[in-house]
Image (cartoon, helix red, strand yellow):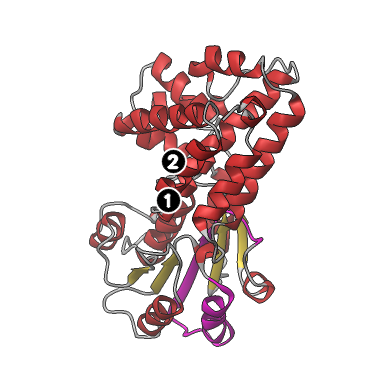
Amino acid sequence: MTTTHHWPVHGHDWAVDHLRKALAHGRIRHAYLIVGTESVGKETLARAFAMTLNCTHPDEAARPCGECRACQKIASGNHPDVIYSELDAATGALRIEEVRNVMSRLALKPYEARYRIAIFRDFDHARPQAQDALLKTLEEPPPHAVLILLAPATDALLPTIISRSQVITLRTVPVEDIREILITRRGAERRQADLLARLSGGRIGWAIRALEDPALLEQREQALGLLEHILTLNRAGRFEIADDLSKDKLALTPLLELWQTYWRDLLLITQGTPLTPANKDRYDSLERLAATLSPDEALAALQATRTLLNNLSLNLNLRLALEVLFLDYPGLRRDRA
């Protein structure tokens, strides 16, 4: 893996090169849509782009320098000209009032930078009416404004939003590249880097956070343990857990992302595929469970998990949606309750 840039972005050299070329030729778009799975590096790329746009280093090729006041303030999340949207704490939705608030702030002239930049995290959580609130800005953007939308996929986005944005799709990073990044740039030991790279499922952001914060691995253990426990329960037990999980919508996305990797591993094992599972540290429990499942059951569970994950941005009855998910999970055929 050869890096061709100095941006603080790992594993997405092609995306960085694309943006650098656009900057070098003065082709800055007013709206960008960065798409990719949870923790793959979307916000890291958006922040690095914002740093480059507002870096004060006299040599444009050296931007972002990472040392000037603008770079440091953007990196810390405290720059007055870089605005972040917030999801509603109760519903997990990106509300129309929040979109309008961000757009009104974006319309103001920059306080101290060349550009005012709005970064919309989890834009897939915006309902159609909230997305509509962006269209006026997209159609008649202020000359100093840059809009960056982040989403795991384009399925929940209005076609008018997509067509008016420069779409950058971030792919998951190969295990070998993540391992090398953790060793050479983050000082990880080889054994630790290998484990985190495989557990990451190609999500470089997760791998780096797990290296810096061992509590993430403990949270992962608890989440996978919960899934394995759910499969032993009867309908009533599953519904009780569905009720508990439905109370924190924001926590469901990383949870379902993780469960999705587990079901993918099970599908590979039930089909006899020789690939190393992403959750290789749980290989024994995966093999035991795979011995009780058919490939069709593993596939159905994987598809059900993916469907709910993709639908989280909708106005769902979360408890009911989780109950339906758990009914699609195998194990109830052995329920005698």
Amino acid type assigned to the residue bearing label 1 in the image: Thr
Q: Quadrant location of the C terminus?
A: top right
Say which mark, if any, is on residue 74.
none
Say which mark, if any, is on residue 44.
1
Residue 8: image location, x then y, percent: 40, 46
Q: Quadrant of residue 119?
A: bottom left
Kind of element beneath mark 2:
helix
Q: Residues within 10 Å of mark 2 (few under 14, many from 20)?
A: many
Q: Is residue 171 visible?
A: no
Specify which label sits upstream in the sequence, 1 or 2.
Answer: 1
Specify start and end residues of the magenta stretch as a single range: 127-155
Q: What residue is drawn where x is 71% and y is 20%?
A: 270
Q: Camera-side residue: 229 or 135?
A: 229
Q: Is residue 240 visible?
A: yes
Q: Camera-side residue: 141 or 37?
A: 37
Residue 86 versus residue 5 in the image, above or below: below
